[in-house]
Image: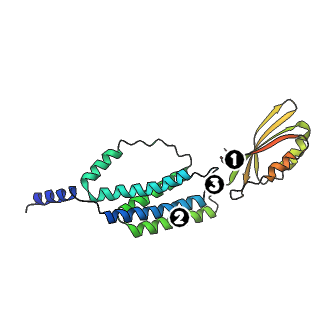
Amino acid sequence: MSVVDTIKKSVLENFTGTVSVGAMLISLLLAFAIGLFIVYVYRKTYTGVVYSKAYSLCIIMLAMVTAMIIRTISSNISLSLGMVGALSIVRFRTAIKEPVDTSFMFWAISAGIMTGAGLYVPSLIASAAIGVLYFIAYLMGFRVSNRYLLVIKYNEKAHQDVLARLKKLHKFKVRSKSIFGKEVELSIELDIKDNGRVDTNIVDQFSGVDGVINASLIAYQNDFGD
């Protein structure tokens, strides 16, 4: 048999190859398990305002769908060509606001690629290592503290009392000050390290001051120094 015949035979075998159901199920189950681990790490280290269950489900789906695609591509050339053509017309327009959320999506995709390629043990070891190292970095201080806007509206006579209570706060920064006749409105950015639990006593401290009209605490996402 000539070299050309050998190449033709090899190509034809790849075009008519089939996807193993057992291997596909193993890849999907392992991708599902790793996706759950990724969601667990994401939830434990989440510092945003509102936790999105839809995003967590998206991470799991990304890992499983990627594993399915890679398993299909690696087993059949004809299906891989069709898959590439189909995916080329898909446009993803959903904006990801936080860079950390993007990294978790890449983690899920990478895990799906490894499980789909049959690298079961390396995918488990790599995902476990990433999760542990990221959690260590989170505990070492590479996390964003919870930030809130404290909006206080008061009369001029309460100005000194409000300033005295502001000086007792851990860390704050005045974002804006508005004056309406004899009324003043302050917007103050607070840095609260409370593991996700808001200390409502801060609002009570200002609302009890004579001359304060109202005080409210609003979730706020920004960095000090901006």
Q: Secondary structure at mark 3?
A: loop
Instruction: Confirm or deny contact between disc 3 and disc 2 (CB under 8 A).
Output: no
Which amino acid type is marked by label 1? Ala
Mark positioned earlier in the residue sequence (1 or 3) = 3
Separation (CA) of disc 3 from disc 2: 16 Å
Instruction: Confirm or deny contact between disc 1 and disc 3 (CB under 8 A).
Output: no
Left or right: 111 in relation to 17: right
User: Looking at the picture, how far across and down is residue 36, in whole percent?
Assistant: 50, 62
The crowding category of the residue bearing disc 1, from other C-alpha atoms within 10 Å (few below 14, some 14 to 19, many at least 20), is some
Question: Farthest residue in the left direction?
Answer: 1
User: What's the residue at 18%, 56% (across, down)?
Assistant: 11
User: Looking at the picture, how far across and down is residue 64, in whole percent?
Assistant: 42, 57
Q: Which quadrant of the figure has residue 76? A: bottom left
User: What's the residue at 61%, 56% (across, down)?
Assistant: 46
The residue that disc 3 covers is: 47
Quarter of the image with the C terminus is top right
Q: Which quadrant of the figure has residue 88? A: top left
| Residue 100 against residue 28 in the figure, above or below | above
User: Looking at the picture, how far across and down is residue 25, in whole percent?
Assistant: 37, 63
User: What's the residue at 63%, 50% (across, down)?
Assistant: 50
Label of residue 219 in the image: 1
